[in-house]
Image (spheres, rainbow, N blue to C red):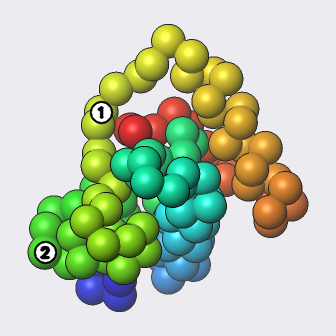
């Protein structure tokens, strides 16, 4: 993940602190997505992500082989966290649910939470 975060940090002229925070929120997003994964079902992203963490996710996807390996390592053999740029009609409900999950687990929510791709 270091090379991916470094690429995003350099492209966006982030401080080390901002890059660390963005990576932290990306990892938390992945953790919650894993926790919400239903056995035998395709993995679906938690609908809420820090805007800086979203930039890391987008960069991660461009490293296709690594992204595929990382998805399978986290979500199981044959699983892949797809990226679908869409905003469903119930986006507010989904975002509120995601923020509740962050709050419950870490007692904080992403500082720049937005709707995210699912």
Which of 91/34 is in front?
34
Residue 31 horizontal side relative to residue 82, left or right: right
Local secondary structure at mark 1: loop
Instruction: Give the answer, above or below, for where 67 lies relative to 35.
Output: below
Query: From the viewer's perspective, is residue 5 above or below residue 83?
Result: below
Q: Position of residue 5 (x, y in %)?
A: 36, 77
Which residue corresponds to mark 2? 65
Question: What residue sits 29% from the left and 45% below the top?
Answer: 83
**Of residues 111 and 87, the one drawn nearer to the viewer in this rendering:** 87
Reading the image, the residue beneath label 1 is: 85
Q: Is residue 102 left or right of residue 38?
A: right
Quadrant in the picture for the N terminus: bottom left
- Dot label at residue 48: none
Residue 30 x, y percent position in the rendering:
51, 64
Who's the residue at 54% across and 78% down the image? 20
Q: How many marks?
A: 2
Local crowd size for mark 1, using a 10 Å CA cut-off: few (<14), some (14–19), many (≥20) = few
Nearer-N-terminus badge (1/2): 2
Label 1 and label 2: CA atoms lie apart by 21 Å
Residue 87 screen position, x and y as percent: 41, 22
Examine the rendering and report whether any part of residue 29 can be seen: no
**Residue placed at 29% from the left, 49% from the top?**
82
* SS state under label 2: helix
């Amino acid at each position: 993940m270091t090379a991916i975060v470094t690429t995003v940090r350099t492209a966006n002229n982030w401080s080390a602190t901002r890059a660390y925070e963005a990576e932290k929120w990306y990892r938390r997003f992945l953790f919650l997505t894993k926790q919400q994964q239903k056995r035998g079902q395709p993995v679906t992203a938690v609908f809420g992500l820090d805007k800086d963490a979203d930039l890391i996710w987008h960069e991660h996807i461009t490293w296709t082989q690594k992204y595929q390996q990382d998805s399978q390592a986290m979500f199981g053999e044959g699983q892949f966290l797809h990226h679908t740029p869409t905003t469903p009609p119930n986006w507010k409900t989904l975002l509120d649910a995601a923020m509740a999950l962050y709050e419950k687990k870490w007692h904080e929510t992403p500082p720049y939470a937005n709707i995210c791709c699912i």
